[in-house]
Image (tube, rainbow, N blue to C red):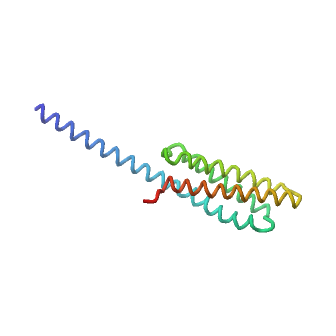
Amino acid sequence: WLWILLGALVVGGIVFLIVRARSAGQAAAQWRSRAREPYSRGVVLHDRLGSELAAPQIAPERIDEATAELDGISKRLNALSVDAPEAARQPMSDVLMTGGLLRSSLDDVKRAAAPEARQAATGAARDHLVDFENALRAFRAAVWPQP
């Protein structure tokens, strides 16, 4: 009886570990799935802003749309940070930080009245847009690593 009981305990332990590993894998897959939406929105925003900041002038309404989109992305990423995998925490933080800097520089572009000030603010916004793109790439590499 002792050997049967010991065998049953070992089999039960193995089954428990398998079920636990499966649920952890499913939770990670669900997190990655939820992370896809803010990442995709960030990429689309980057592409749109790249062309708009290259134009001689950007309409204030477009800046408002971009800042609202950045706020939405930040909100989603902050919600994801609660149960983020360790490998994604720093890249996600970098996306949040560079997104905040980009948002601030877009506000500066909107407030700039003089053409020289607007040009300088637009240059700073382009620089922050490059940083935002790099942070998005690092986030993608951490969340969806290439085999």
When the figure is inspected, residue 12 is found, relative to residue 26, above or below; the finding is: above
Residue 147 appears at what percent x and percent y? 42, 59
Q: Residue at x 13, y 36 (%)?
A: 4
Q: Is 57 displayed left or right of 17 in the figure?
A: right
Q: Which residue lies furthest to the top in this view?
A: 2
Which quadrant does the N terminus fall into? top left
Q: Which residue lies furthest to the right in this view?
A: 114
Q: Is 131 displayed left or right of 104 in the figure?
A: left
Q: Which residue is drawn at 59% across and 51% down?
A: 76
Residue 121 appears at what percent x and percent y? 80, 56
Q: Residue furthest left?
A: 1
Q: Which of 80/56 is in front?
A: 56
Q: Which of 6/129 is in front?
A: 129
Residue 28 appears at what percent x and percent y? 44, 50
Q: Is 104 displayed left or right of 142 in the figure?
A: right
Residue 134 appears at what percent x and percent y? 61, 56
Q: Which residue is drawn at 47% across and 56% down?
A: 145
Q: How many marks?
A: 0
Q: Residue at x 71, y 57 (%)?
A: 127
Q: Which of 141/33 is in front?
A: 141
